[in-house]
Amino acid sequence: MQQPELPADETGRVIGSEPVTLPSAEPDVADHSISIVIPVYQGERTLAAVLGEIEPLTRLSITPDGYTFQVEEVLLVFDHGPDNSASIIRDITERYPFARGIWLSKNFGQHAATLAGMASSGGDWIVTLDEDGQHDPRAIGGMLDTAMREQASVVYAKPTNPAPHGALRNGASKAAKYLLTKLSGSGAAADYQSYRLMLGNIGRSVAAYAGSGVYLDVAIGWVAARVTTSPVELREEGERSSGYSARRLFSHFWRMILTTGTRGLRLVSGLGVIFALVGVVFAVVIFIQRLAGDIAIQGWASLSVLVLLSAGFILFSLGIIAEYIGINVNMAMGKPPYLITTDPADGPLGRTHKAAK
């Protein structure tokens, strides 16, 4: 991934939405410090290029609207992926003094890894972005301008182009966000993206109280005063396969639904009322047929269909209730959303020397 030039006019101001490094005559303390959190699962081929693009932003930079900012730290959260990302993180932290590895005890998933990085951050603002190079770090300046202009505590990147995932996945994503918006009662659900900018105190507070299984963006929405979006162009993913299978994507969507609140249980109640009304209508029809002496053996087919539908509804309702109970049981048992440890290479597991026999 080639690092593009940062275009500016003759005054040094940025052209478009990209920040530029300030001249040496400017003050060396930025008004806004930024921590970047990158959950790492399959970053072996792409992570080094992403850090190369972030590196210019670790110097004093200016946004299109004139705010000074500086990336103080990049937190690389190792989530025990299938490739050699651990070695890449170690190499990067040796090369870049602003980069720091955060080591999880096991694979907890992207949102838990993001929470772990947010909890470990110290900047005025937290930016979360993916490891695959799809998110352009130079858009941070424009997102910061949006936050200041609209006095928003959370800014989501709003893609100006279709996500490079294929028509089927993009369509499924739109449908899932539409359904989530209706169930959550919040229009912000349609704007959820893994490329976010948020106030540091908001992000660290969310990381402190979010329980096991809670969807990150839902938890942010509980406490953020104002949530908005900023236009950003998505790029092609790096040379790697997606870490999300169809099963994991559905699980991701299902967790979003469950953690939006109790609307899922209300849906069960609503379906129960509908089936009760259907049952009353069916009973009236049977009663009228009985009075008219028009009960025929063919009616058993309708009865069988009704029984199957009722049984399916009951099992579906029990499944939703069980999922809610499971989330509460995990929280009651104290299951952590993540656990931060030290680099295994620096501990007992890294001591591979054997004594001579």
Image (cartoon, rainbow, N blue to C red):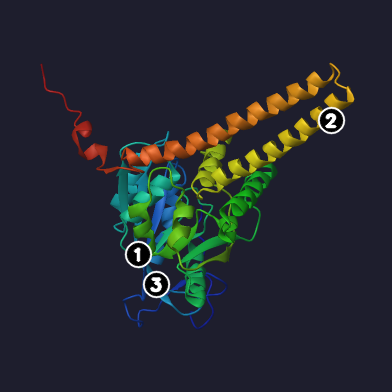
Secondary structure category for the residue under label 2: helix
Residue 16 shows up from this direction:
yes
Q: Is residue 91 left or right of residue 272?
A: left
Q: What's the distance in space between the residues labelled 1 and 3, CA to CA?
A: 17 Å
Hey, which quadrant is residue 127 in on the image?
bottom left
Residue at image coords 49%, 73%: 145
Residue 75 shows up from this direction:
no
Hey, which quadrant is residue 118 in on the image?
bottom left
What residue sits right under mark 3 in the picture?
A: 69
Secondary structure category for the residue under label 3: strand
Q: Amino acid at mark 1?
A: Asn
Upstream in the sequence, badge 1 or badge 3?
3
Please determine whether, in this image, residue 34 is positioned above or below residue 162. below
Residue at image coords 43%, 43%: 213
Secondary structure category for the residue under label 1: helix
What residue sits right under mark 2 in the picture?
A: 288
Residue at image coords 86%, 18%: 296
Q: Amino acid at mark 3?
A: Phe
Residue toward you, 65 or 5: 65
Q: Amino acid at mark 2?
A: Ile
Please determine whether, in this image, residue 230 is positioned above or below residue 10. above
What residue sits right under mark 1 in the picture?
A: 201
